Image (spheres, helix red, strand yellow):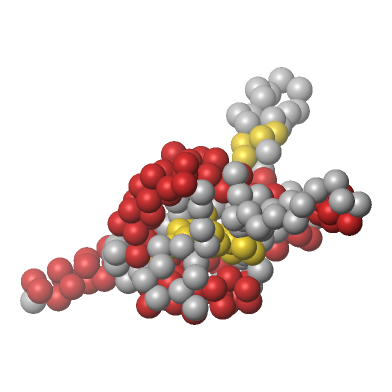
Amino acid sequence: MYVSILLLPGLRTMPKRDLSRFVRWPKNVRLQRQAKILQTRLKVPPSVNQFTNTLDKNHASDLLKLLLKYQPETKAAKNQRLKDIAAGKEQAATPPAVIKYGLNHVTSLIENKKAKLVVIAHDVSPLELVVFLPALCRKMDIPYVIFKGKARLGQLVHKKNSAVVALTQVNKEDKAKFDSLNTAFRAQFNDESTHRRKWGGGIMGLKTQKKLELRAKAIAAEAAKKAQY
């Protein structure tokens, strides 16, 4: 928010300033801003910091296109299908390959090595719900990816939000694309250990940085004085 401050008659107009830090934000926005600042200031352990390393835009769009083909049916479509089967208009067929969702369900699929690809949202709150999933996927040798946006995953399964989704099988026509994406995801997430060992946060504000800089200069000057004697 930039505001132009008018002075008394005869004086020039002050330049525009960013006054967003003085705005009285709604409570939910204030909490979001405080959480963001805390995450920047505090030291963030590697297991939590790895969720800042998300999938790039190109791979994310390719993955979304693939997942859209395996959307589960809506409640209305399911009811209509069951009515058609009951009325004899349609034969009961083998269930198609669809996205699996639900934290407990996906976890059991990973433990039983039935999942072929696991997609984890980066902004789950509280993060403790999914913080163990990357390690579990690596242990079971299942490719996983950290995807930006639990709301976007929720849209795929007709929910408001979704913490994690998984694919257990794909159709023959999508096999080549699925394998190429899996190879890329393994290289970026399963096999890459740099981002898993890197601590995050620890970045102070501008005023604190300036204060520490002046303090360091004063200590250096004091040490130089002592060295002269």
Q: From the viewer's perspective, tell me whether residue 171 is left or right of residue 210.
A: right
Is residue 161 visible to the viewer in this orientation of the structure? yes
- The quadrant in which the N terminus is found is top right
Please name the residue shown 56% across and 67% down the image. 38
Residue that protrudes farthest toward the top in the picture: 10
- The quadrant in which the C terminus is found is bottom left
Q: How many marks?
A: 0
Tell me where residue 103 appears, x and y as whole percent: 63, 72
Q: Is residue 66 above or below residue 45?
A: above
Is residue 35 visible to the viewer in this orientation of the structure? no
Depth check, front residue: 81 or 167? 81
Please name the residue shown 65% across and 50% down the image. 71
Depth check, front residue: 9 or 44? 44
Tell me where residue 101 appears, x and y as whole percent: 64, 64
Q: Is residue 14 above or below residue 86?
A: above
Please name the residue shown 63% across and 54% down the image. 96
Tell me where residue 211 appears, x and y as whole percent: 41, 63
Tell me where residue 93 appears, x and y as whole percent: 70, 55
Q: Is residue 47 above or below residue 59?
A: below
Q: From the viewer's perspective, tell me whether residue 77 is left or right of residue 102.
A: right
Depth check, front residue: 6 or 20? 20
Q: Quadrant of residue 126?
A: bottom right
